[in-house]
Image (tube, helix red, strand yellow):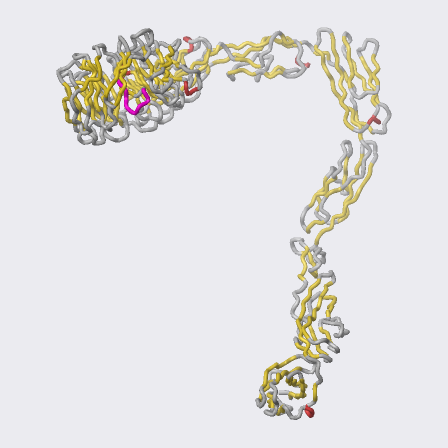
């Protein structure tokens, strides 16, 4: 991504102390060469990382087995000796899952490789191809689109690569190089985000070329020289491809000539190929730098040994919050080295430091956290050019250091910088030893910026002009006042001067910002008579305006006509109020020699004829509460007064009554209207508008509530009747009922009652089932109804006991409680026995009786009187009157 450049003073670093960044130095072994950095890989198949290094005395290859998996116990094993070793690479060359070794035997001038069986036992050396002792870069990476890596060597004479055919190698010489054959640096990775491997080469002059793998198999290449980019280098072994800024594409990093990186702009949408160089710090010691993600957040970190002997190790971290690397930070607790690499040697998931020195190989455990604190600083003050020295504030984390132009010892010297905005960088170590930075701009100004920006000279203004200055807090000239306001008030004229603002910064230095010149002329002030308040029925009124003797005046408004004086120094306007009610603006404009035009204003108010005021409000109020009456159709120019003397269009009322409001205008015309408010008194009758409630009353909360009408009960009476008989039916009386309407089963039933009890005659009623209903009404017309299902039995004649041929006998009769009914055995048919009272209501039975049986009829719970016993045998009904004597 594109980012602002950070200015770094080469040779200056910030020294912080943190014992928690890296663990103590642990020696892996001795007898190693400083010319070839170690490579970490699992060489014995036990899941932890071992180390392959170049031997010093043997001038061969040595690998150290990580016995305990945490890097505290190492055993060396010499792989090659007594040879002139060039570069070497550890990689799985045959696809068997174990790491083999490829190396350049410069003594025999051949490339060789040895197969690892997966346990750290290597087979005999096999020749890949002839290669002169030319130095350069040796890498193993797939550029042919196959699962196996190719062998690529780029030296000062040419770049050559060997196609890997399952361990059999075919030489190719088709990689284009920059500026002829001399491009010792070659890197392989997907540079254009098309999912195939491309290459980057850099020649001795720092020219950079990218090769686009068009077919993905290394058969077709498009090579492009990056214009305008110079990327000087010293040690090809410290050049890396990494996604430095986390945008998804690969960038080029170098920590050997000067700490810098070449940003790939492909992921930012730039045209291919587009790159940008970013320098970080002064030259490191030759070959000493390396870049990786050590923790402290999502960005990568770079460590190197500087050329000076006063500092041991410098570190810079990519800070995503400011889209750039932090200024170099000196790290304590680490000793200088000749080369450095990183790998997780103790299995804790963090990249540890692997360091090579003369005849020794050591490592430091990485104790940095995965996340770092975010740095912050207060805003920086604005300073005057040629000003003093400004002490930069401490930030968070505290104790950090500032870096940038004109900064030394956390002090910014404004006298060294021309006007402009300069980004300064604050860098500090957090409590875990992670470097974190933040940028904050500081501004140097020639003088405050005054707005609005006006040109020329101001002679006349119609309204105030409010000037402001950035930065604020400066001093304005006296004719503007303390707040920088240029007044348009004619009484203050003439006045003038140059608009300026004098600013004093925190160092005590002053600077002045300049603006427009002001020379305000006197005003040609017109005189204007008042418009006044009038009635719509008034006659034509006149308004007069006059101006300077050596000038003129004009009058504007809803006039019927204007009458000017001979020299136009005065004018009369004629205004007719009958044109309508309202407020009419009138203004006079005067001008004169050497004066600014000025305006005077007045208004003519024409009152309307009052209309009947419409009062809105609640028609009822609860006792002790307030309601507000409002005139809902107010007229401009009309005044309102209530009958109690309250002015205005609203009135608060707390009692019931008739309220009056009068509308009037300035001409004495008026009209009134009334509004009645009813005060609700708890306990007084009301109407809740519910037909099915009765006895409605106002409650304490002024709600109107009544008693629900009903409920209705069942009809009381026999459910079995006989034709040509009379029966009584009734229903419980309901409060507030005004009418009981009985609905008889058929026209053969007759009644004359319309109360809660009805006498029904069943003369001529048909045999079968029928229904008797009653409807009850209250005064509001609310209806309640219920019905009773009735069975009409066979209408046969009832014979007297004397005609019954002695079929049954009742005794004792009269009785005080129990009657016994004997059905003679001579009777051939079973019978049904039931009793009714004198009005026909069934009080006992029916009950079946067989011939020869005796049935007891217990009436001990009934009152004394006449009862009728019925015996129904096959449709033939006989009866017997029974007399129950009082108990």
For this view, does 822 lie left or right of residue 219? Answer: right
- Tell me which corner region of the image, top left, top right, bottom left or bottom right, holds residue 508: top left
Asked whether 695 falls inside the magenta stretch, the response is no
Report the label total.
0
Q: Residue furthest right?
A: 539
For this view, does 313 lie left or right of residue 267? Answer: left
Is residue 793 placed above or below 417 in the rendered structure? below
Image quadrant where one finds the N terminus: top left
Residue closest to the eye, 329 or 161: 161
Is residue 527 shown to the viewer in this render? yes
Numbered range of the magenta stretch: 144-151
Residue 849's spot in the image, x, y percent? Answer: 59, 85
Residue 863's spot in the image, x, y percent? Answer: 64, 83
Is residue 761 shown to the viewer in this render? no
- Tell me which corner region of the image, top left, top right, bottom left or bottom right, holds residue 541: top right
- Tell me which corner region of the image, top left, top right, bottom left or bottom right, holds residue 30: top left
Prevailing secondary structure class for the magenta stretch in the rendered image: loop
Residue shown at 15% from the left, 24% from the top: 76
Residue 816's spot in the image, x, y percent? Answer: 62, 89
For this view, does 823 lie left or right of residue 124? Answer: right
Image quadrant where one finds the C terminus: bottom right
Residue closest to the eye, 396 or 98: 98
Residue shown at 36% from the left, 20% from the top: 216
């Amino acid at each position: 991504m594109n980012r602002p450049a950070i200015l770094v003073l080469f040779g200056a670093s910030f020294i912080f102390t943190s014992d928690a960044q890296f663990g103590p130095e642990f020696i892996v072994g001795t007898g190693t060469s400083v010319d070839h950095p170690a490579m970490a890989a699992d060489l014995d198949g036990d899941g932890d990382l071992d180390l392959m290094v170049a031997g010093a005395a043997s001038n061969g290859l040595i690998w150290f087995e990580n016995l305990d998996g945490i890097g505290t116990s190492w055993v060396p094993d010499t792989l090659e000796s007594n040879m002139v070793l060039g570069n070497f690479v550890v990689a799985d060359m045959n696809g068997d899952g174990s790491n083999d070794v490829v190396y350049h035997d410069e003594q025999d001038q051949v490339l060789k490789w040895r197969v690892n069986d997966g346990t750290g036992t290597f087979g005999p050396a096999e020749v890949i191809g002839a290669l002169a002792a030319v130095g350069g870069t040796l890498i193993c990476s797939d550029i042919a689109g196959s699962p196996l890596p190719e062998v690529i060597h780029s030296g000062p004479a040419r770049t050559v690569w060997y196609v890997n055919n399952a361990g059999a190698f075919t030489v190719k010489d088709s990689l284009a190089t920059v500026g002829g054959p001399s491009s010792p640096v070659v890197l392989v990775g997907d540079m254009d985000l098309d999912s195939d491997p491309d290459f980057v080469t850099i020649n001795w002059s720092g020219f950079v070329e990218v090769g686009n793998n068009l077919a993905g198999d290394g058969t077709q290449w498009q090579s492009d020289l990056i214009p305008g980019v110079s990327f000087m280098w010293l040690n090809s072994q410290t050049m890396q491809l990494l996604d430095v800024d986390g945008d998804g594409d690969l960038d080029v990093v170098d920590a050997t000539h000067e700490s810098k990186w070449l940003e790939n702009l492909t992921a930012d949408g730039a045209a291919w190929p587009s790159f940008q160089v970013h320098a970080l710090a002064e030259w490191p010691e030759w070959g000493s730098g390396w870049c990786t993600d050590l923790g402290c957040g999502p960005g990568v970190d770079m460590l190197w040994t500087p050329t000076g002997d006063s500092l041991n190790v410098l570190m810079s971290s990519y800070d995503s919050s400011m889209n750039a690397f932090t200024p170099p930070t000196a790290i304590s607790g680490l000793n200088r080295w000749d080369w450095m690499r990183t790998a997780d040697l103790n299995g804790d998931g963090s990249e540890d430091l692997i360091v090579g020195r003369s005849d020794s190989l050591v490592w430091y455990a990485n104790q940095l956290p995965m996340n770092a604190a975010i740095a912050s600083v207060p805003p920086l003050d604005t300073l005057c050019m040629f000003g003093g020295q400004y002490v930069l504030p401490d930030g968070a984390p505290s104790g950090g250091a500032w870096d940038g132009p004109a900064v030394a010892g956390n002090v910014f010297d404004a006298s060294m910088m021309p006007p402009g905005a300069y980004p300064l960088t604050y860098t500090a170590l957090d409590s875990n030893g992670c470097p974190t930075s933040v940028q904050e701009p500081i501004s140097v100004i020639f003088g405050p910026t005054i707005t609005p920006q006006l040109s020329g000279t101001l002679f006349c203004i119609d309204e105030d002009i409010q000037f402001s200055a950035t930065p604020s807090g400066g001093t304005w000239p006296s004719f503007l006042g303390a707040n920088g306001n240029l007044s348009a008030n004619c009484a203050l004229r003439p006045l003038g001067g140059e608009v300026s603002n004098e600013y004093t910064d925190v160092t005590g230095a002053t600077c002045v910002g300049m603006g427009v010149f002001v020379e305000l002329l006197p005003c040609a002030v017109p005189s204007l008579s008042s418009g006044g308040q009038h009635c719509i029925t008034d006659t034509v009124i006149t308004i007069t305006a006059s101006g300077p003797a050596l000038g003129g005046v004009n009058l504007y408004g809803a006039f019927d006509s204007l009458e000017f004086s001979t020299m136009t120094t005065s004018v009369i306007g004629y205004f007719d109020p009958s044109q309508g009610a309202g407020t009419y603006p009138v203004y006079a404009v005067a001008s004169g020699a050497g004066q600014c035009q000025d305006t005077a204003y007045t208004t003519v108010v024409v009152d309307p004829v009052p209309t009947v005021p419409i009062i809105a409000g609640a028609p009822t109020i609860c006792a002790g509460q307030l309601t507000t009456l409002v005139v809902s159709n107010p007229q401009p120019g009309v005044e309102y007064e209530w009958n109690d003397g309250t002015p205005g269009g609203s009135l608060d009322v707390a009692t019931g009554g008739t309220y009056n409001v009068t509308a009037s205008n300035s001409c004495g015309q008026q009209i009134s209207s009334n509004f009645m408010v009813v005060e609700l008194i708890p306990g007084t009758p009301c109407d809740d508008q519910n037909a099915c409630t009765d006895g409605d009353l106002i409650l304490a909360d002024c709600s109107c509530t009544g008693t629900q009408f009903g409920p209705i009960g069942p009809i009381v009476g026999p459910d079995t009747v006989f034709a040509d008989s009379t029966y009584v039916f009734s229903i419980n009386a309901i409060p507030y009922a005004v009418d009981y309407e009985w609905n008889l089963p058929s026209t053969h039933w007759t009644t004359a009652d319309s109360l809660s009890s009805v006498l029904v005659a069943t003369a001529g009623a048909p045999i079968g089932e029928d229904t008797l209903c009653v409807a009850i009404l209250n005064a509001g017309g609310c209806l309640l109804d219920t019905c009773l299902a009735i069975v009409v039995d066979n209408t046969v004649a009832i014979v007297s006991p004397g005609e019954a041929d002695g079929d049954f006998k009742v005794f004792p009769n009269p009785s005080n409680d129990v009657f016994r009914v004997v059905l003679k055995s001579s009777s051939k048919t079973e019978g049904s026995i039931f009793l009714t009272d004198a009005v026909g209501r069934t009080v006992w039975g029916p009950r079946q009786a067989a011939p020869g049986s005796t049935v007891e009829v217990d009436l001990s719970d009934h009152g004394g009187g006449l009862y009728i016993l019925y015996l129904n045998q096959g449709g033939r009904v006989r009866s017997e009157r029974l007399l129950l004597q009082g108990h």
